Amino acid sequence: MSALNRGITILIVALTIGCSYFAAAGPLSGSWLTDITIRPRQTPLFSAFTSTLKIDFVQRGVSVHSISIFDIYGWLWQEFQLAANFGVFSIDGNILFDPVNVAFVYGQGIMEFSLAGTSIALYTAMTGPTLFGGPRFGMAFVLTGDIGDRIRVTNTTFLGANLDEITFIHPPPRAPIEKRYTTNPLAAAGQITFSGSTFTLTAVPFINSEFISTTAFSISGFRYHRFAFNATQIAGLPLDIEAELKSTLQTTSLTITPALNLWYGCIRLHTALLFSDWQLTGIAIYGVELSGQWDDVELRSILALDEKNFDLIRDPYHGVITLTVLSPTANRRLSIDTYFGAPYPPQLFDWGETNFKICVEVTEDVTFSTSIVIDWRGFTQWQLSITTRW
């Protein structure tokens, strides 16, 4: 048995013993969520089935979680989480297994020490030997300090990893359920070397604004420098600005996106300022939104006038009307979403589909919801969900 497999075996045994200890040490809580999707016009009839069982143990700043995810083919993911907070010191860990292939997939650990506005964090992660590219391991050190209430300085040093996240997806025909984690290990096991660093300064110069300066280096040297500025309602005016200046060894680019945030009572105009050769040439109105609320009834309508360049509504539609009704006791909710701009025929005001959804809190521990989708082809989807908590 290789050293890696021995380590994984020891880890699994330790987790099993630890979870058994916590289960015996005190009361457990948890939830069980089940979703069933039926598509009457497709084969097979049951197009999707997911069930998530979560068991939690929390005591004295320590929490242990077991998350089991199933789909129509069986056991999909098994995840264990451990979090502990001891005042200035905290630990957060995740371990993911693939029960189908009986394999270790991913492990992540985050240790952080915080005191007086300064924190030091160590991110570590490892992928299993069954994944493409073999086992990988990586680390990242993050040092953060606050200067007053408006400035934060962060230095991140990468050792065979980055913090751009890593995502695991089971291939078809398994359900497309994603598991996403912060630390992405990149280096082959046993080859941990310096792979880059970033220096970031974040400042809040005034209310509703943010300034970010980032300098990035790789193992071969300078990568880029980026200035970003975001502000909303500048000087109390309905003016929003997003600006970015990015420089590399070869290029420099500047992007400025100003927008007018116009509200007139229940009417909102989604607008953007148009520039050419650094001169203001006009204002583009790319959406109109109407909204209103009467007691427990809320009505909202959005019409997208330029969905190609400004994405307001999910594809392929260009308009939506949403009606939401809440019961006086807030244990029942009805929502109706009607989309326009149907894909067939592709006309702006043609009806596309209507989604009906009802959510009922049967008891404090049981919630039931159902949704129906009807489009120009007829009854196309029926989804049932039930959540049980204890």
Image: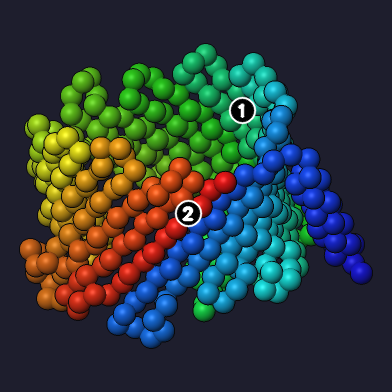
Going 47% across and 54% down the picture, which residue do you hit? 387
Contact? badges 2 and 1 (CB < 8 Å): no
Q: Position of residue 238 (x, y in %)?
A: 18, 29
Q: Residues within 10 Å of mark 1 (few under 14, many from 20)?
A: some
Of residues 34 and 277, the one drawn nearer to the viewer in this rendering: 34
The answer to whether residue 195 is seen in the rendering is: no
Which amino acid type corresponds to the residue marked 2 in the rendered image? Thr
Q: How many marks?
A: 2
Using residue 330 as the reference point, say whether residue 341 is left or right of it: left
Of residues 154 and 117, the one drawn nearer to the viewer in this rendering: 117
Q: Position of residue 97 (x, y in %)?
A: 69, 63
Q: Could you say whether the residue bearing mark 2 is in a helix, strand or loop?
A: strand
Q: Position of residue 27 (x, y in %)?
A: 69, 41
Location of residue 67 with respect to 77 vertically, above or below = above
The image quadrant of residue 327 is top left
State how the image is colored: rainbow
Going 24% across and 24% down the picture, which residue do you hit? 234
Which amino acid type corresponds to the residue marked 1 in the rendered image? Thr
Location of residue 276 with respect to 314 vertically, above or below = above
Going 53% across and 74% down the picture, which residue do you hit? 72
The answer to whether residue 356 is seen in the rendering is: yes
Going 9% across and 64% down the picture, which residue do you hit? 348
Name the residue that disc number 2 marks. Answer: 387
Q: Which label lies toward us, 2 or 1?
A: 2
Q: Position of residue 296 (x, y in %)?
A: 20, 38
The image quadrant of residue 379 is bottom left
Q: Could you say whether the residue bearing mark 1 is in a helix, strand or loop?
A: strand
Location of residue 272 with respect to 233 vertically, above or below = below
Name the residue that disc number 1 marks. Answer: 144
